[in-house]
Image: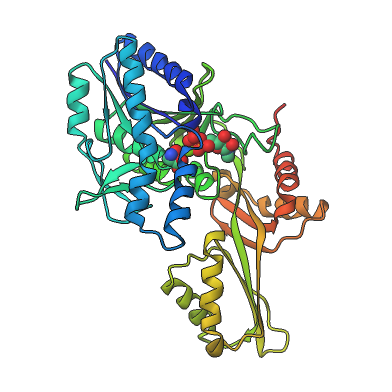
């Protein structure tokens, strides 16, 4: 008898018919003699609505603890409904909210980190022959308050539960058939990958491919949880996230990701002297603004230079305010901000041992007349910043150039 964790995303539990279909799927696994622990998201669109309500009533500086109370409610509804749908099929089932599992987290409301879970009550339910249905996305802080794990966080709930229970595998059911070479909703020729390494998946997720949430991949990698991404709408194998050694034939580039959550800031005419970068980025760090790509241009006159960097769109206004505050110290000529940019990244562990990957990227974009505004690289990825209007064109061109188009 195996124990499997199955997680169902928002579109998979979008209405009562979909919830009934999920219950039947869970029942089939159970009928084969396996134990099942299920993790559910809120119905599609519900979390967005809840977040919007918090913003409307709470203003810009809303209380983050109450934000969690509101947004966690979407998963409470689906966990109870799925337990009911299972019971209607004659399958004993019990729901568990984050505090009941319990999924212990720190106090950072809105983006809490999971600290530990023994999941004892969940184990007990499974031992009694019940299907345990955990409300994803939720946790509980030491003071007993409800927390949430950040958007997309029910993937993390699933991996945490799979690790705690020592599950044989963690199946993440979503609205596409697996992890593709790039977002299949943007590039029709995107191909489903049979396997992807943890490392590549981690980069893909952190660079914008929302099919798996970043922390869930990091945790799966650390705890050796076997994750499969697959569709709840069809019965076909999905994508397995595996160690590098389990991949036989490795492409140089496995996938292409993009993120629209980017904004570019340029400080024009800052002094070209020691301490300037420390002042700029020190003041941003103090204000909790995360900086991603950084470009400093060569000083033409030996006295002043331009510094360009990116932040997430939500942080742009704060970054502008912070830099206005240190204008006297920095004495820059002007500040330019542009929120209409996108970061496109090519990812692949094969890059470690192959030259020319970056050149192909730059050449492909040049041929389409797409200007590169910033570049950053790591061992297994190259990211570039471009005008948002060219997102689709760049993704399609790069997908073909790296030989990823479906045949
Ligand atoms: P769920 O609600 O099931 O968690 P998400 O919307 O969070 O689903 O994630 C699935 C979506 O991720 C897909 O609909 C797809 O548009 C998007 N996506 C982005 N990049 C990829 C990729 N490389 N492979 C598959 N899906 C991707
Ligand atoms: N419902 C939450 C969200 O929309 C968590 C999740 O779906 O993973 O972000
Ligand atoms: Mg998701």
Nearest the eye: 395 or 240: 395
Q: Residue furthest front?
A: 57
Residue at left 21%, top 16%? 129
In the picture, measured across the screen, residue 118 lies left or right of residue 47, that is: left
Where is residue 226 shown, x and y percent of the image? 38, 31
Where is residue 261 shown, x and y percent of the image? 57, 54
In this view, 366 is above or below 310: above
Indicate which quadrant contains ligand 1: top right
Q: Is residue 86 visible?
A: yes
Quarter of the image that includes the C terminus: top right
Quarter of the image that includes the N terminus: top left
In the picture, measured across the screen, residue 172 lies left or right of residue 128, that is: right
Nearest the eye: 95 or 206: 95
Q: Quadrant of residue 350?
A: top right
Residue at left 45%, top 77%? 282
In the picture, measured across the screen, residue 244 lies left or right of residue 313, that is: left
In this view, 208 is above or below 120: below
Where is residue 21 shown, x and y percent of the image? 45, 16
- The total of numbered circles placed on residues is 0
Q: Quadrant of residue 392?
A: top right
Residue at left 46%, top 62%? 60
Nearest the eye: 143 or 328: 143
In the picture, measured across the screen, residue 219 lies left or right of residue 382, that is: left
Residue at left 33%, top 9%? 31
């Amino acid at each position: 008898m195996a124990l499997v964790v199955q997680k169902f995303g928002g579109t998979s539990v979008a209405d009562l018919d979909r919830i009934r279909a999920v219950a039947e799927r869970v029942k089939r696994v159970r009928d084969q003699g396996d134990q099942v622990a299920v993790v559910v998201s809120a119905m599609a669109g519900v979390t967005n609505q809840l977040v919007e309500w918090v913003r409307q009533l709470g203003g810009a500086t809303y209380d983050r603890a109450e934000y969690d109370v509101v947004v966690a409610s979407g998963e409470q509804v689906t966990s109870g409904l799925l337990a009911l749908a299972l019971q209607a099929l004659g399958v004993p089932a019990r729901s568990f909210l984050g505090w009941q599992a319990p999924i212990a987290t720190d106090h950072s409301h809105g983006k809490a980190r999971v600290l530990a879970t023994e999941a004892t009550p969940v184990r007990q339910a499974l031992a009694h022959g019940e299907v345990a249905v955990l409300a994803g996305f939720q946790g509980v802080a030491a003071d007993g308050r409800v927390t949430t794990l950040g958007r997309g966080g029910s993937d993390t709930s699933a991996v945490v539960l799979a690790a705690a229970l020592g599950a044989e595998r963690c199946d993440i059911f979503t609205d596409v058939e697996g992890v593709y070479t790039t977002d299949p909703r943007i590039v029709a020729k995107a191909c489903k990958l049979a396997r992807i390494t943890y490392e590549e998946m981690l980069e893909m997720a952190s660079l914008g491919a929302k099919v798996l949430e970043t922390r869930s991949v990091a945790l799966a990698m650390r705890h050796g949880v076997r994750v499969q991404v697959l569709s709840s709408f069809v019965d076909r194998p999905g994508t397995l996230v595996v160690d590098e050694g389990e991949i036989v034939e490795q492409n140089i580039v496995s996938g292409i990701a993009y993120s629209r959550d980017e904004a570019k800031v340029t400080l024009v005419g800052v002094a070209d002297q020691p301490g300037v970068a420390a002042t700029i980025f020190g003041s941003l760090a103090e204000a909790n603004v995360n900086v991603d790509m950084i470009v400093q241009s060569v000083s033409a006159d030996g006295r002043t230079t331009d510094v360009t960097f990116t932040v997430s769109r939500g942080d742009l206004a704060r970054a502008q305010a912070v830099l206005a505050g240190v204008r006297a110290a920095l004495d820059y000529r002007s500040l330019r901000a542009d929120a209409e940019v996108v970061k496109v990244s090519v990812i692949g562990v094969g890059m470690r041992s192959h030259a020319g990957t970056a050149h192909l990227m730059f050449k492909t974009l040049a041929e389409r007349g797409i200007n590169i505004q910033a570049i950053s690289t790591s061992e297994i990825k190259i990211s570039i910043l471009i005008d948002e209007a060219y997102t689709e064109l760049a993704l399609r061109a790069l997908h073909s150039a790296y030989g990823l188009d479906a045949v």
